[in-house]
Image (cartoon, helix red, strand yellow):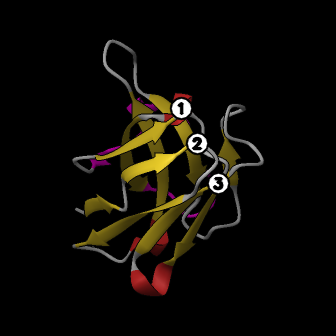
Amino acid sequence: QVHVVESGGGLVQAGGSLRLSCAASGRTIGSYAMGWFRQTPGKEREIVAAISGNGGSTYYADSVKGRFTISRDNARDTVYLQMNSLKPEDTAEYYCAARVSSFRHYITEYEYDYWGQGTQVTVSS
């Protein structure tokens, strides 16, 4: 079992940047596929980006392509989400999720087994 904790959220102006981190404990994350999701009140949780355990396969939602980058440092058991050119519509609670998989990514929340508590990102206009 793996435990994940998000950090790095905050308040930023439109056009700014933030880097979210997801630190894992309990197991080394090299064999875990990871995903970043976000949710706003009254809406379903949506995929933002995903990465395979070995980092060789990634996915981005159309809304963040070219602005966000998912990466991982398996030696540090940490996954990152670099968010650039932030927009007010990126405002949400961001969640990190994990499941066992070395070679593929996953894009639906039902495919993930472990979740963090979330970190709030607020983008002001």
Q: Which mark is residue 14?
A: 2
Write the residue at 67% across / 48% down: 85
Disc 2 versus disc 1: distance between alpha carbons?
6 Å
Circle 1 is placed at which residue position? Answer: 88
Query: Looking at the image, do the residues carrying marks 2 and 1 touch, with CB atoms under 8 Å apart?
Result: yes
Q: Is residue 97 above or below residue 110?
A: below
Say whether residue 106 is visible. no
Q: Position of residue 111 (x, y in %)?
A: 43, 37
Which of these two is toward me, 70 or 105? Answer: 70
Please give the name of the residue rendered at 22% of the width and 73% of the height, measured from the top-left corner: 26
Separation of marks 3 and 1 at Cα, in angstroms: 12 Å
Q: Which mark is residue 100?
A: none
The residue that label 3 is drawn on is 84
Q: Which element type, helix, strand or loop, lies under badge 3?
A: loop
Q: Residue type at mark 1: give it.
A: Pro
Query: Can the viewer see residue 37 in this picture?
Result: yes
Q: Residue at x 47, y 40 (%)?
A: 123
Query: Which residue range is magenta in the image?
Result: 100-115
